[in-house]
Image: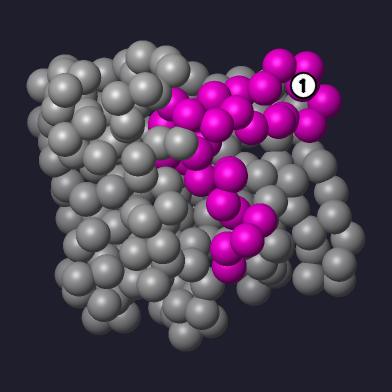
Amino acid sequence: MKNNLFNSYVIGLDNSSVRFKNFIINNSHLDATFFKGIDGKQIDKEERIKLNLTKSDFPLDLTDGSIGCALSHRKLWEITAQQKVGSLILEDDVITHPKIVDFININYEGLMKFDITLLSVNTNSILDCTSPEGVRTLNHFYEKHPKVDEIKKILGRTNIDSVKGFKLYMGFGHSAYFVSPEGAKLLTSKIFPFSGLPIKIPYVDEKLIPVNQDTEANIYYPTMKAVVCNPFLAYSPNVDSTTEF
């Protein structure tokens, strides 16, 4: 690691894949450690229960991707808690701001006071948050699946000095976030096993039963020290997202 304030990880299944090579191209400013994600295809229903991912009465089935993603993030939370150093955790489809490392280093002490700081959310869903001035907003995004070139233009126009932390109530996606050791322990203890409890999405009639860790987290964000950066310091095209509103 080139920095000594925090650890950086990028989750992927294959660091020789085209997907991961594109991550390297789009994030050449990063020095993130490749973390080989857990393959959900290898985890059957009985194993999910043993691993404390779900209980035996969980009402829905999980996709291989959801299983692998949740267990991979949880493993990195366990590592973060054990090492007692904050972590930048990324998924391998994300594009980050060229100065994202500078931002975290500059604000490291402040970020460590929070449980989790989302540096991005899925733009094909909703974001419920409150500004530092106390204004609560519910946001939908016009461009649900931004193109790579457009993402780079947006990030190029984003000044890291203008970024503020907004209190997070609901936001989807764990493509880029900073987690403190205390937050990592809290997320692990709260999110697993998945509760099977439905969550109400504003302006959406049907309630949603979470089947991945970033959706389940919305049950607990309101009572956690959870924030989201505004403007974002990372974006994903969301082509693999399973949650869209």
**How far from the left and from the top, in percent, is residue 154?**
63, 45
Check the picture and name the quadrant holding the C terminus.
top right
Above or below, comparing residue 225 to residue 34 in the picture: below
Seen at 37% across and 56% down, the residue is: 189
Above or below, comparing residue 142 to residue 27 in the picture: above
Q: Secondary structure at mark 1?
A: loop
Seen at 66% across and 45% down, the residue is: 170
Seen at 46% across and 36% down, the residue is: 195
Find the magenta span and give its range.
Answer: 196-225
Q: Is residue 237 left or right of residue 5?
A: right
Label 1 Cα crowd, 10 Å radius (few <14 / some 14-19 / many 20+) = few
Check the picture and name the quadrant holding the N terminus.
bottom left
Q: How many marks?
A: 1
User: In front: 207, or 228?
Assistant: 207
**How far from the left and from the top, in percent, is residue 106?**
48, 81
Q: Is residue 240 visible to us here?
A: no
Coloring basis for residues: one colour
Give the residue type that dot 1 points to.
Val
Q: Which residue is mark 1?
A: 204
User: In front: 241, or 153?
Assistant: 241
Q: Is residue 165 left or right of residue 73?
A: right
Q: Is residue 221 magenta?
A: yes
Seen at 20% across and 62% down, the residue is: 79
Where on the picture, by quarter, is residue 199? top right
Where on the picture, by quarter, is residue 11? top left
In the image as oriented, which residue stretches furthest toward the bottom? 109
Q: Is residue 8 magenta?
A: no
